[in-house]
Image (spheres, rainbow, N blue to C red):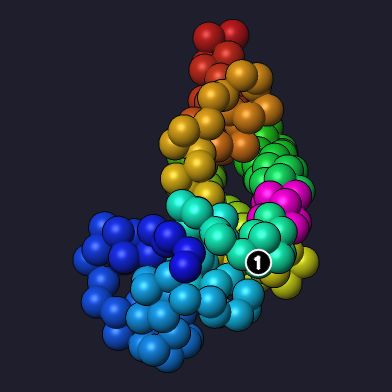
Amino acid sequence: MNKTNVSQLRKKYGLTQQELADKSYVTIRTVQRLEAGEDVSLSSLSSIANALSVPISGLFDDIEEKEKEQEILDYSQQQASQLYRRKNESAVLSLILVAVDISVLSFYGYWIGQQPENKQAIFGIIWLLLLFLLIAGALYVYRIIGVERLDKKYPKTVGLVEKKQKETEKIDNIWAFLANYWWVIFPIGGFLSWLIPTLTDAFR
């Protein structure tokens, strides 16, 4: 009989067996069997693991059947590989969105600086509206289009909560910092790209 963590994880999230079954798209009998240490299919294990936001290996403390243990180990390795590639691709997408948005705001801010002073205030208001529009557009592309694409490309990572991983990750370089906090850096950088040229022109 296998020793699982499913019951503890389920209770940690405040879920009943039926709620976990519904969230995992499996039957309540499957959840009951897994919690009792009985064998269930790999696809069911994957669905339940995704619903609990853990890798499939995180469902178990001990697996008695060597064949099943190897099957789960192979799946976990594939899952870890896909998650690593997904995180890297997600970071690149974030940086591209930041670069595009800051470039648009910088060029527009420079253009504002070339306009007559009596019109700069009006264009500055438009700049602020553009700032929020670009933030909304970047979030839509990242969270809707980007996430959907990554889910299809890396199906074994669907349901894993990257936010939890980011909380424990050590940020050891500027790229990791930009990838994690672009949503803060972007509006500040965009505002400064407009403010600095404006102040420079004002003190000439």
Residue assigned mark 1: 68
Judging depth in this view, the residue of 151 and 147 nearest the camera is: 151
Secondary structure under the numbered disc 1 in the rendered image: helix
With respect to residue 119, does 135 lie above or below?
below
Residue 198 is inside the magenta segment:
no
With respect to residue 187, does 18 lie above or below?
below
**x and y percentages locating residue 12 in the rendered image:** 26, 58
Residue 76 is inside the magenta segment:
yes
**x and y percentages locating residue 83 in the rendered image:** 68, 51
Judging depth in this view, the residue of 180 and 193 nearest the camera is: 180
Is residue 87 in sight in this rendering? yes
Name the kind of residue labelled 1 in the image: Lys
Task: State the image quarter where residue 115 is shown.
Answer: top right
Tell me the crowding category of disc 1: few under 14, some 14 to 19, or many 20 or more residues within 10 angstroms, Cα based: some
Read off the magenta span: 74-83
Task: State the image quarter where residue 63 is shown.
Answer: bottom right
**x and y percentages locating residue 72 in the rendered image:** 65, 62
**At 34% across and 59% down in the image, what residue appears?**
9
**x and y percentages locating residue 117 in the rendered image:** 53, 31
Query: What secondary structure prevails in the magenta region?
Result: helix
The C terminus lies in quadrant: top right
